[in-house]
Each structure stands twice: as C-alpha cells, then as structure tokens.
Image (spheres, coloured by chain):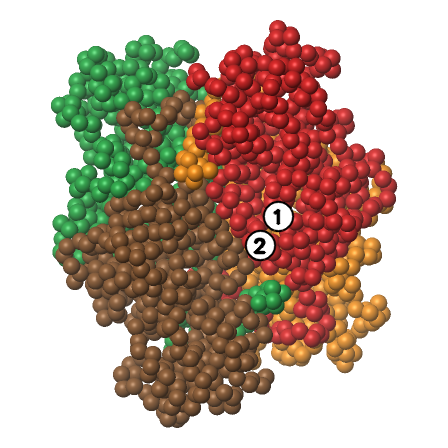
Chain colours: A orange, B red, C green, D brown
Amino acid sequence: MTKIEKIVLSYSGGLDTSIILKWLQETYGCQVVTFTADLGQGEELEPARAKAEMSGVEDIRIVDLREEFVRDFVFPMLRANTLYEGQYLLGSSIARPLIAKHLVGIAREVGADAVAHGATGKGNDQVRFELAVNALDPSLKVIAPWRQWNIRSRMQLLEYAEQHHILVPSDKRGEAPFSIDANLLHTSTEGKILENPAEVAPDHVYQRTVDPVDAPNTPEVITIGFERGDPVSVNGKAMTPAALLTKLNGLGGRHGVGRLDLVENRFIGMKSRGIYETPGGTILLAAHRGIESITLDRAAAHLKDEIMPRYAELIYNGFWFAPEREMLQALIDQSQAFVSGEVAIRLYKGSASVISRTSPCSLYSADLVTFEESAIAYDHHDAEGFIRLNGLRLRRWAARNGR
Amino acid sequence: MTKIEKIVLSYSGGLDTSIILKWLQETYGCQVVTFTADLGQGEELEPARAKAEMSGVEDIRIVDLREEFVRDFVFPMLRANTLYEGQYLLGSSIARPLIAKHLVGIAREVGADAVAHGATGKGNDQVRFELAVNALDPSLKVIAPWRQWNIRSRMQLLEYAEQHHILVPSDKRGEAPFSIDANLLHTSTEGKILENPAEVAPDHVYQRTVDPVDAPNTPEVITIGFERGDPVSVNGKAMTPAALLTKLNGLGGRHGVGRLDLVENRFIGMKSRGIYETPGGTILLAAHRGIESITLDRAAAHLKDEIMPRYAELIYNGFWFAPEREMLQALIDQSQAFVSGEVAIRLYKGSASVISRTSPCSLYSADLVTFEESAIAYDHHDAEGFIRLNGLRLRRWAARNGR
Amino acid sequence: MTKIEKIVLSYSGGLDTSIILKWLQETYGCQVVTFTADLGQGEELEPARAKAEMSGVEDIRIVDLREEFVRDFVFPMLRANTLYEGQYLLGSSIARPLIAKHLVGIAREVGADAVAHGATGKGNDQVRFELAVNALDPSLKVIAPWRQWNIRSRMQLLEYAEQHHILVPSDKRGEAPFSIDANLLHTSTEGKILENPAEVAPDHVYQRTVDPVDAPNTPEVITIGFERGDPVSVNGKAMTPAALLTKLNGLGGRHGVGRLDLVENRFIGMKSRGIYETPGGTILLAAHRGIESITLDRAAAHLKDEIMPRYAELIYNGFWFAPEREMLQALIDQSQAFVSGEVAIRLYKGSASVISRTSPCSLYSADLVTFEESAIAYDHHDAEGFIRLNGLRLRRWAARNGR
Amino acid sequence: MTKIEKIVLSYSGGLDTSIILKWLQETYGCQVVTFTADLGQGEELEPARAKAEMSGVEDIRIVDLREEFVRDFVFPMLRANTLYEGQYLLGSSIARPLIAKHLVGIAREVGADAVAHGATGKGNDQVRFELAVNALDPSLKVIAPWRQWNIRSRMQLLEYAEQHHILVPSDKRGEAPFSIDANLLHTSTEGKILENPAEVAPDHVYQRTVDPVDAPNTPEVITIGFERGDPVSVNGKAMTPAALLTKLNGLGGRHGVGRLDLVENRFIGMKSRGIYETPGGTILLAAHRGIESITLDRAAAHLKDEIMPRYAELIYNGFWFAPEREMLQALIDQSQAFVSGEVAIRLYKGSASVISRTSPCSLYSADLVTFEESAIAYDHHDAEGFIRLNGLRLRRWAARNGR
C-alpha cells in the first residue's frame, strides 16, 4: 500500500462515516481532515464537529454550500430540463461533483495526498466522487473504504463499531435502516422492502412531501419569475437560488408534489429501485418548460430535447467535470439568453401544472396563429409550397417503391 | 386549373366540411365521395350520412377505424414513450396518417384522381394529410379548400353557407367556437381565449376529464398488462386495443388524469397554445415506462430516449409514412420483444403513478443490488477497475489542462 | 405588388445578374445598388463596376471579403470537421450567409427596403440567401427574379438579353455553360452532361486541380500549424486565414487534391450531381482531424462526430444564422481550446495524408500505451473490473433472453 | 481460484498463444481445446495443428470462417458506412465477436466451462472478446492470461518460453516485433517506432498495399454491383462475400488503396497509434456511399449518418452482441431494401473514387433538377412558400432579439 500522509474525508457524522474515520486513522496511521457540507440536507451539522473532535480530528471543516449548490449545479442542470430515464431529477447525482470539488480544494489547501468517501461499492456515488476527483486533481489518491475493507454487511459494520468503541445510536441497532440521501434538491430512499419493485412503497418512506391524499383540498397558484434561463423570484419576490429552492420545497412538499417511485439503471450495470421526493425541483422543471415554451425558438428547443438524455446520463454517471458535459452545457447555456418571464403554476394534490406564462421576450404571436383575419402577413399559399417541397422527396420515394 | 374527375373528401358532416363539400361540387363540377371515419371521437356518424345524401353525394363511406387506429398507430407510437416537446402525446398528429391512408385507399377503389381535406392553411394537419397522401400515392392530387378559396374568417364562412343554403346550426351562429379535435386518444381545444397564453384556461374547455378538484377523494389502483411492448389487459382482463384504450379513458377521465395546457411549436413556424386531454394515453405512457423499467436493458432504454424527440417530431410534422420514421420504428420495435409483464398504477386527482411492476422477463435482481451480502457474485474490486479506467482519460485531460 | 423603394442586388457582373439588374430596374422602377463580393473566386471584379456603371447604377459596392470569409465562416465550420453527406465540404453553402450579411448591412446603410439575388428556383442558394436575410433583418423584402419572372430556360434568358440590349459574351451564345460557383474554399460545377450521374465527368470540368495522373510524381510533405482549433501556419510560416487557404489551394491543386464527384440531396427535395474541387479545404480537414487526434479527449471527439452531420445539414440548408447552429457552434468551440500543434501532411496524386503530429497540448502517452513495462501506473487488473462491470448488464440480458 | 474443468483457447499457433496454451495447462491442470479460425489472415493454419498436437492438445479445431465473417459481420457493418473516429474501418473490432461466437459454440459443444484469449490488458480486444462471451453465454468463465500472469514485458515472455521449452522462432528472438492483426478486411500494425505519433511510419510496416508511389501509373476502373445494400459482383461477375472482398483486396492493394495512419482513442481510455491497411474495405465504403447516393432518400441517408458514429463506437468498444447494436442494425437494415445497382470506381495511386452510378431503383431525376425546361411539374412558386415558412420562426426570432 502506498504511504498516505494526509486524508480529507467526506464526513457526515453519521455511523458509517464515523466508522470510516476510525478505519482510516487505524489503517493509514495519518492525519484525517473531515469535511462536512451543508447542502440543505436538513440536519444539524454541529454534532458532526463534536463527533469529529472526539475522534481526535484536528482539522474540521463544516461549510455551507447551499447557494453554490443551487446556483452552480442545480440551475445549470435545470436549464436543460434534465430528467434521467425520462423521470428522475438527479438530486443525488448533481450533489456529488460539488462535494468532490470541495474535497479537492481542501486537500490542496491542507496538503493532503488523498481524499476518502463513504460510498459503497455497488452504487453510483463512488463513481461520481472519484471521476470528479480524477478530473479536478489527477494527482490525488481516492480511498473508498467500502471497497477496501472486509465489511460486507450491516451486521459486520455494527460489529466493527462495537469493537472500536464507536457509539451506535439506539435507533440504528435494530433493523437496518433505509438508505437515504438528502439535500436541497431532493430526498432519496432505497433498500429494504423497496428492493422488491413489485412491493408498493409504504407511506413512511416519504419524508419531505405529504401524501397527495393528505394535501390541501384547495389548489394553490404560485408564480415563478425567470431571467436568462434561471428562476429568480417566487410570487414576485426576488430570492437567492437556495432561498428560492427552499421556498418551493415548502410549497411543493405541502401539496404532495414531486414524489417518484422508480426502477432505474445504475452506471455500474444493475437496476435499482428508489423513492425520490423532489418538490421544488419538480415545480421548477414544469415552470422552466413553461417559460421556454414562449421564449425559445422551435429548433433550439428541439435540439435541447434531443441532447438532454445524453446530458442527463453524463450527470448520472458522474461526468460533470468532463469535457463532453462542458460542451453540452455550452450548447444549453447559449440557448437561454431570452428565457425570461413569469409562469403561473397550480399546485394541487401532487401535481404542478403550468396555467399561464408571460414574457417580455415572447416569440408567441396571437396574430400569427389566430383562426380569424389578422394584421400579420400570412399567405396561405406559402403553406402550399412548403408542403409540396417537403413532400417532393416522398413522392419520388413512393413512385420508386411502387406503392 | 387541372381537370379533376372525382374527389374523395374527408367529411365529418359538420359545418366546415359541409361547406367544403358544396364548394368542391361547384368548383370542380365532379363527383365527390365522402369518407367519414369513426376514430372514437364520440359523435354519432349517421347524421353525416344523411347530410351527405342531402348534398347529393352518391358514394358515402363511413368506416369504423377504432381498432386499426389504436393497434397500428397509437400503440407503435407508445412503444417509444413518445412525447412532443417533452409533454404532448400527439393525439391529433397520429390520427392524420390513418385518415390519409383510407382516403387514398378509397380513391384507388373508386378511381378518384384527387382527395380533399378541411384542414386550414395555418395548421399542422394540412401538412400531415398531404405528406401522407404524397407518400402513399404520389399520383393523387390533394385539394385543400382553405388554402384555395377566398374565405378567410368565420364571418365569411357563415356568409358562404347562407348564400349556398347550407344549414348553420343555431349554436354556431353566434360567437366562434373553439377549434376542437377528438378521437380515442385525445381531445384538443384551441382558439378564442386560449390564443392568449397568459390567460388561464376556463374550466368549460375541458370535455373529457373532470377537474382534479372534482375527482374522487379516494385513489384507485388499476393494473395494466403488457405483451411485447403493447398493453393487452386492464385489471387482469384481456381487451382489444380500442376497448382497452376506451376503458382507460373512462378511468382516467374520472380521476382528472391527462390534462395538459401547452404552448407548442407548429411545423409551419408559429407557436400555438392548446388544451389537451389524453386520459388513457397518459396512463399508458406511465405504465409503459414502468414495465420497461424492469424489462429493458439500460443501453436499449437510453438509445430509445435519445431518438424519441426526433421520432416525436417526425410524427408531429406529418412524416409517419416516411422512410426515416420506418427506420426509427424498426429500432424501437426491435427493443420490445421482452417488454411484458404487469404494472400497477395509482390514479388520484389528476395523477397516474406507477407503484408496482412485475414481469416474467424482468432484468431486475434484488440479489445484485442489495446492501446486504448476497448469493450473486459481485466483486467490489470490479468497481475499482471500472472507475479507474473510466477516469483514465479524465486524469490525462486534467493533467494536460493544468487544472 | 408592394412598392419597393431601393434594392441591393448581389451582383457578379456576369450575364445572369446583368439581366437581373435590368429586370429589377424595369420592374420596380427604383434605384438598385449593386454589391459585388470578392470571396476569392479568382475573377477580376473591376469589370463588374464598369458594367454596373453602364447600366446606370449609381451606388456600386465592391468589397474584399476574403479574410472575413475564411476567418469567420470557413474556419468555424472546419472546427467541426464538417462534411455534408459524408463527403462534401460545403464550399458554396458557407459563402451564402456571408454575402447575405453584407447585403443586409448595405441595405441598412443605404436605406434599402429589399435585397435581390440571382439564385434559381430549384437550388439551395435561394434558401440560404433568404433564410439568412430573414434572420438578420426580418423587415427586409427579398426579391428572387428567377422565381418571379417568366424566364424558364437559357434560351429565354438570351432572348431577354437581346431584347434589352444586354451584351452576351460570344462564349455564352452557343451551348449552355456548366453552372459554376467559385470562392476561396472551392469550385463547384453542375449541369449539362453531369446531370446524368452515370456519365463520367469529362476532364475539362475541373478548373482548379490537376488530374492526379498529371500531378507530380514525387510526394510533397507540408506542415500545418494550429492554434485553438484554427490553422495558423504552413511550413512554419504564420499566415492570415485567407493567405493560408490560398497557399493550400495552390499546393493542393498542384497535387490533384480535393476532387469530388457527388450525387447529393438538396434541401428542396431533389437529388443533384456536382463536381467539387476543394484543394485547400481537403488538406485542412485531414490536418484538423490529425491535430485533434492527439489533443482532443475521446468523449469530446465522439460528441463532435455525433453532432457533425446535423451541423453540416444546417449549414447546407441555409441555417447559419439560426439559434440551433449557434448552439452547436458553442459546443464545438468549447472543445477547441487545446487543439494546437503541428501536423505533417503528404500530398501525392490526389491524396492528402497525415503522417505525423506533435503538440504541446498532447493527450497521447507512449508510456501508457506501450506493450513494454512502463513508468506510468497502469494496473492490468483494472481492465478486469472495467470489463466485468461493462458486461454486467449484458450477462443479465443474456440470461434473461435464454440464449 | 475457481476450479476449471475444460478451456477453449483462441489459438493462432504463434508464440504468444503457444505460451498461453502451456500456461493454461500448467495453471489449471485441465484439458485445453484449441480453436484456430481462418479469417483470411493469410497464414497457413496447418502448422497451428501440428504445434497444438505437440503441446498435447487432444481436441483441435481449425475452422474456415471467411464467408461468415464477410457476410454476417463485415457487410452489415458496411451498410452503415461505418467509420470509427471518422476514419477507421474497424477491421480488428469486427472480427472479435465472430471469434467469440465460435469460442462459445465450441465450449458448449465440448462441455467447457471457460474460454481463453491472448489479448493483452491494455488493448480493446480483451473487452471485445469478453463482452461478446458475456452476451452469448453468461455462464462461461473468461480467462485472460495477460491480465493474470506476472509476465509484463516481451523479455519476460521469452524467458517463460525458454523455461518451458517452447520454441521461439529465430526471427522473434531479437528486437520486439510490431503488433500485427490481420484478416480479410484489414491488417493493422502497432508498436515500436509507431508509438511516437510524430514519427513517420517507415515503409516496411505496410504489408498488404504498395506505396502509392509504386502503384501503377495508369488508373484502373472497376465496377461493383449491389443488391439490397450488399456488394454482390465485381466487374459484372457475381461473387460470394469472401471471394468478392478477396478480389477487391487484390485490386486495392495493387493500387495502394486503403492505407491509414491514425491516432485513435481506445475504449479503456488511452490513445494509441496504428497503421491500417484496408484495401477492399476502402473501395467498398466508397462504392456503398456511391450507390446509396442515388437510391437512398435524403432523410434516410441523414439519419444513417447521424447514428453512424454511435454504431461505430459500439462495434469498436465490443458491443456487437448487445441490444443497442441490434436496434441500430434494425434501423440501418430497414433502409437498404432498394440500395441496388452498380457503381464504377477509379483506382489510382492510393485513391478509390466513384465516377459513375446506375440503378434500377434510382431516386435521381434529371428532369427534376435540370436548369432547362422539363416535363416534370416543378412550380418555382413552391420554393417561395417553402422558404417563407422555413423562415417564419427565424423572422420572429430576429425581431424578438432586436438584431
């Protein structure tokens, strides 16, 4: 094993990363710096500091990344109306490169030669962390304890904790918990009963949204303002990115918006089933499509739709910091200069529906489309020529084929 | 003007096509055969026969195309999870080539040298009808009265009717109606107040679905069975394609499922706003994605997602009978051999959500994905190599870029 | 007919545009400004001035656009390794938007309300001119005499000339000439015997390249330097874009490089056959691929290759000034920051072959690829994991399929 | 190590696989069946039998796969005009799945539980063999000695041979040879001096084609006939697939056709430089594009061009037996029904140029394209409408943008 001098660990303060912290200290016998990011996961972070201190960590970093997360990761992704496999808003995927970026930044600052993460060997997150680190600093070593140690089950994990005098919270002593990931964009839940895709997800797996059945019986209409492709206000009130997403999470969660029960394909080759709750993101996707519908040229919109699945796949697979993602981002961003205006959304019992859109940059023309006579020059004979020349190759083809 | 001997007219019996029938008879002085298709639009078709008879039509064709429509057009399109501009289920677009196919078939049968349709000069339907006719019989002339005559508004249309003693129903004498298209897949509504995309659609434009607010307060769970990519049963009961879609329209409509308020881009270059109601189709789309999620290989699924926007655009633009659509269909159909199984869907207040899926052809493996020890060989070290080689080019790239 | 006040005509001084000039003056009775661009077509332009003066034109514009043409149109297109239908370097297509840009610029400067061009009604150029004008100034009218007048053949054209006392050069009185387009990038030849795609093109249709049989019997090796995706030097000597392309045209032409005999698909629906000579462009395409081969990341290169046919189609169809072309350009340009270095090319008897490439930004690593032991860490076991996880979904798929 | 009962080895009889054979026998102590395929590599195969016998192999399989190779692998790939990274005809890539298919077939026949190959741990071939085996029989184990043993250089390999009394041919005792792969489609050469992409390849690396300088001074014109997308005759003489490719290899090689000096991107992440000679394949690619140019509809051709890079990547990366490749093949094959006719090609000093094409299924119409008056109805006013509606969205876009 290469000698490691100093490690920066992505540390939540939870059981897994506490055990990893101990294992790193024992295995490598070197200093471990902990990095705990506030991505809006809704947990107190100070307990993580206390736990790290108790484990003898001297350099403890706790950083609020919420604005950076939404501004530089969530919103750029939103510009593409991104959905993985037609449905998933990529709430976990998009957070990983941000964490990796800060792991690398701290590693450079403190002169560490390795970073470590707590992602398991069967999931996507290990790939996302490590590809991002590769792309940001190829000289850094990445340590993935879950792939290196011999712990292969929850039972073995608890045994290790016990042997090493790591406190196991009483609620974690019993049955294995769901595997949960949360941040400002979403909460995901996997494992246990959900591993059978035929089983209906029990209501208690949902944490951030009410069951639509329990949502208010009256619809609520909100407005979202956009500037150059990004949301900037809710109900006419300007907000920072993180504040805006937080606001929409509250509104969406209350109305049961953004639940998704999905079987998806992992990059490493297996299918997995997850429950996602993305209240604010779901509203924003609808709103962004709504404002684009009146401000984006047809060919621009269709080109975006065609490259979107690829773009989503890249983010899902961990290629955020990769030249091909940056190229697609350049294409997407190029299209957003006039995507400004306001959209009204109706929230009701799990749905977020666009019901109105206005824009100073609108391409929509009622004069052009109306069934009635209009001021704008539209010559019906143009359609004749348009159709005849679009059909020219088809007429040749049909005549040749002898239909 | 070329001499026309006989025309087959796509005829609904409504005011517009009644006027067109008269205009064709007068303008071309030749026999006009009327063709009225039952696509499940929910209207009595026998009145059309009476009206055609009164107008002196000798050859009147009324054909029930519902099963052909769903089996040969709707279902193949569904296999691709087709959405135009991310949202529209193409209910109008997919019906046009079928009508054109029968217009051409009848024209050949009766020896007509032209077909005629009542689509206006600003819409997509004229393109769809005419490209399909071009591709099916390039020798046939297509007559589009709305582009040829001088009538340019509703007022002028009513004047023409009056001059030619065509009965105008009293409900059509007043304000112009919405422009409506209906068939087994959907009902679309355009025009009037909807021409302002900022105006919220009034509730009375919806005809086939209840407002989610008025839908039952209790969710309903249904199951849909699939075989080789196509739906074949509802709640365990086998059904023909049209019967199945009719059944789902009833269920979806009752629960307010399938409403869409959209500003879309027409092929001929303008934006238009429409209200769509596609209750059964919306359920089927969710269900089809659900069954694919456990039966389709990842790369197959992603390839389908990538070509889908193009495929949708082709159908929307009227290129159903075109080599490129047939090529994409071959690709899509190739993927569906094992897309069989059953999906459970929860209908509630406007939503149709997949909650369970089972299949004898499932690719899902709980053993492979579980967090716990499992019987299936999965070597965590494989992930190490997988990530390292996926990252190899990124490490080179980063080192070169000097980040 | 709308009253036109002033027209800017794209004017070559040749027979066709001289007739068009006369026809515009007669038909519209207004001032016509002529615009003649030097795109390196290899003709004297001063005779055009004399002819325009003789026709009573008061405002005559002759502009040298060679550097702008190569720098802002040819090189950006080259960055994408652009080929239409796998073979055509788009020499005509890429010149049209530039001419349109200047037509519009002059129209605004002189207060004209229309622009006119001499492209025929069956070709691509009419589309390219007019879409570019539409996109640059939608208020300008476009006049296309070939679509408006009654002249429908060469004979009628000569008759019109005679009637209007327009001098017909003696070499144009006899048999119709080939239809030729030339600029710094290429010369294209169409028409006459070439209209039969089975006929071998006679040698005299080639104007800019020698027959490879007559090219030197000794290969010549040249080097081309690139910076950030664009060529900047030949044989170590820095050159401006137009000078560089001129130099390569000389070298390529001498070695018979860049001939293409192609049947292509026009945007308006028919197939046509053309002979293209693109000596310098052919060398540059090979050289650009050569320098990219060592400086571009794999995924970046593959993404470029995948979008290239679409990008080429847009340029061919006349959508240079369109949002979707600009979006693709943003993607392409994003990839070129490190595409710098030098490529050696062997010219011989019609071929231009890359034989060597060097770059300060190379991503190539001999250490990584060598069959022998090397200093760079490459663990053969990584390949094991890489393959096993890439194969995981295939093993599941195969087991399911029961092969 | 899992107990292995019987192994089928892909065996050439050369030094590497002879050593591997010995290593397998020693390491696994089980029966090894050798499989030697005749893919037209131009070597005697009977010596392989003798060597295998001397090594104690009891079950020796030598199979002539030339017709299957060309008919079921090369020709389907050719239908897509396949080029990897714009240039490489995939001569090695396309042979691997065929070999894997027969390895699996023999393994099943003889009851083997593993297959073995001699591909190294840094190349693409290991991936191609193993993914194909995964997809054809996921129960088979794959043994890749180059990744498992400790031999890491040529010197160590020779030492192993000496220790195990394996005869090393005298010409292999000295300097390391180039790494060569040959079959009916191509010969590739890598390694040694070629590992420096700046070094010009010395002439002696070429084995199958003459230097264009040494090729005949007189061009030779040949004709190739196609039926439904596949070549079926040369100079009017019908031939089987392998005979046809063999014939064209002779013609092309004599004229120096098909040389390529390329730096390419391997799937496993590094760049490598190779010299390829693909004489017959290069001619066929030009000929296939030539026949498609008059028989394929524009949109069909463009769709093929757009998916081609992806298809090529899949083959290069080893995903021949994968659902996504089969889907793309279905799309491609769907387009070829009318790709029949004859193409004339001029071979001269390294070039293969289409000079004429004819087809009973031609879509080309001289009447339609001619500059002169023609019998076919083409209304120049159609172009007006076509352009105006194609430009409609651009005029709106430009007006909005305020250019």
Q: Amino acid at mark 1?
A: Arg
The residues tagged by marks 1 and 2 sit, at their Cα atoms, a distance apart of: 9 Å
Q: Are marks 1 and 2 in contact (CB under 8 Å)?
A: yes
Q: Quadrant of residue D77?
A: bottom left
* Residue C67 in view here: no
Looking at the rendered structure, which numbered label has been put on residue B79?
1
Mark 2: secondary structure: loop
Q: Quadrant of residue B120?
A: top right
* Residue A262 in view here: yes
Mark 1: secondary structure: loop
Residue found at x 76% / y 34%: B209
Name the residue nearer the viewer: C68 or D64. Answer: D64
Where residue C270 sits: x, y (%)? 37, 34
Where residue B137 sits: x, y (%)? 47, 32
Q: Amino acid at mark 2?
A: Ser
Along the horizontal axis of the image, is A292 left or right of C64?
right
Residue holding disc 2:
B335
